[in-house]
């Protein structure tokens, strides 16, 4: 018998139905990554599993027990299922170590000393033993999320649920949290992780669930989902999350925001620091040194430049595509004396080659 079995799960609100008809099973020790577009019921699904949301209809069996039954002991259920939220949900008025001690003392009957010793062990496991007597606000976002993971583990759960655990983090903090989750996966803990980190989903998961429009549309091994998806929607979604896009519609381009977005994308794809730097250098040269100066010179208020960076698994086959057709339409002459954006030494030094797909659209293949 599966540890988790979901049959015809439906969740309705007065103005929306985030879950229409979800059917799934999870065996003990599996790590399930749940992916899909935003707003397709992924978070609602795992919140229904531990009854933070009450299903409208359907059946959820956890270790053989129907958690939708009115007689279900929800407190006992939640002891079996730890939950890690997007926003940490730590008690700000308690020391870090106290955050880990409270529930085991109240619900598991541990003595204060037992709870303290366990808390220190768990903080050691997530690399934060030295922060035991800090306040939560004194920690970085990544550290607080690691504390939240340790707190969930303090209840000794059979199942651990993660609701987009890295979505509220700065890019540089994502990897430290994913590393902890990966370590837990190697220990055989049953986990369901709602995530947008595709490389993590591929490397760590036993299976991947692709959810769309309130249903579980596709389930399979990471290889099946990422390399051989059965549905076009799955294929299209995976392609989109491997791509970064940016539109420049003003001469006062918010360069810092654009670069931060690009950096976040590179880190989500687990690209090396050097590759990430190359991408930033290339796009900086294209935009700041070539395209925008020309647009300013000829009073083109809306350059309407579209940038796309896409990559295969592991940072291979990286391509930058730049669409500058609008500049041509507004007076730029490609390869004129003052506008030859693809011939600079920086661009030539960072790419294998480039090609003009059509006048105004170029692809640059990064080495």
Image (cartoon, rainbow, N blue to C red):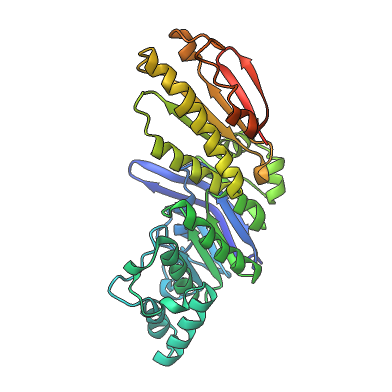
Residue drawn at 49 percent across, 46 percent down: 264
Q: Is residue 309 left or right of residue 90?
A: right
Asked if residue 55 is positioned above or below residue 347 in the image, the reply reads: below
Residue drawn at 51 percent across, 82 percent down: 121
The image shows residue 162 at horizontal and vertical percentages of: 49, 60
Quadrant where the C terminus sits is: top right
The image shows residue 31 at horizontal and vertical percentages of: 62, 61
Q: Number of numbered discs present?
A: 0
Residue drawn at 46 percent across, 63 percent down: 68
Q: Is residue 241 or residue 126 the one in the foreground?
A: 126
The image shows residue 188 at horizontal and vertical percentages of: 65, 70
The answer, for residue 177, to whether it is visible in the render is yes
- Answer with the quarter of the image where residue 74 lies: bottom left
The image shows residue 357 at horizontal and vertical percentages of: 63, 17
- Answer with the quarter of the image where residue 95 lies: bottom left
Quadrant where the N terminus sits is: bottom right
Asked if residue 31 is positioned above or below residue 346 in the image, the reply reads: below
Q: Is residue 41 or residue 236 the one in the foreground?
A: 236
Asked if residue 58 is positioned above or below residue 313 in the image, the reply reads: below
Residue situated furthest left in the rendering: 93
Residue drawn at 45 percent across, 64 percent down: 84
The answer, for residue 69, to whether it is visible in the render is no
């Amino acid at each position: 018998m599966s540890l988790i079995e979901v049959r015809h799960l439906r969740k309705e609100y007065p103005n929306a139905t985030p879950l229409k008809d979800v059917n799934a099973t999870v065996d003990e020790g599996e790590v399930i990554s749940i992916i899909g577009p935003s707003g397709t019921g992924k978070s609602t699904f795992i919140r229904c599993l531990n009854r933070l949301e009450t299903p409208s209809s359907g059946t959820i069996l956890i270790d053989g027990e129907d958690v939708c039954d009115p007689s279900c002991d929800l407190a006992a259920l939640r002891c079996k299922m730890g939950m890690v939220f997007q926003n940490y949900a730590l008690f700000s008025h308690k020391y870090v170590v106290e955050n880990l001690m409270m529930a085991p003392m109240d619900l598991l009957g541990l003595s204060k000393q037992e709870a303290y010793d366990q808390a220190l062990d768990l903080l050691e496991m997530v690399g934060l033993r030295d922060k035991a007597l800090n306040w939560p606000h004194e920690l970085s976002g990544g550290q607080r999320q690691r504390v939240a993971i340790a707190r969930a583990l303090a209840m000794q759960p059979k199942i651990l649920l993660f609701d987009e655990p890295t979505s509220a983090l700065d890019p540089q903090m994502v990897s430290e949290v994913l590393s902890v989750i990966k370590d837990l996966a190697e220990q055989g803990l049953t986990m369901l992780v709602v995530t947008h980190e595709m490389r993590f989903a591929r490397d760590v998961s036993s299976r991947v669930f692709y959810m769309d429009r309130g249903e579980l549309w596709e389930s399979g091994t990471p290889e099946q989902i990422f390399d051989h998806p059965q549905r076009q929607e799955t294929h299209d979604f995976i392609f989109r999350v491997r791509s970064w896009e940016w539109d420049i519609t003003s001469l006062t381009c918010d360069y810092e925001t654009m670069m931060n977005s690009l950096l976040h994308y590179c880190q989500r794809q687990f690209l090396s620091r050097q590759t990430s730097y190359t991408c930033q250098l290339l796009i900086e040269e294209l935009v700041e040194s070539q395209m925008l100066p020309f647009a300013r010179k000829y009073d083109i208020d809306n350059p309407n430049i579209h940038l796309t960076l896409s990559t295969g698994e592991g940072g291979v086959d990286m391509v930058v595509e730049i669409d500058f057709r609008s500049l041509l339409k507004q007076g730029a002459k490609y390869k004129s004396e003052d506008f030859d954006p693809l011939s600079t030494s920086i661009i030539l030094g960072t790419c294998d080659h480039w090609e003009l797909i059509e006048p105004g659209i170029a692809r640059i293949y990064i080495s």
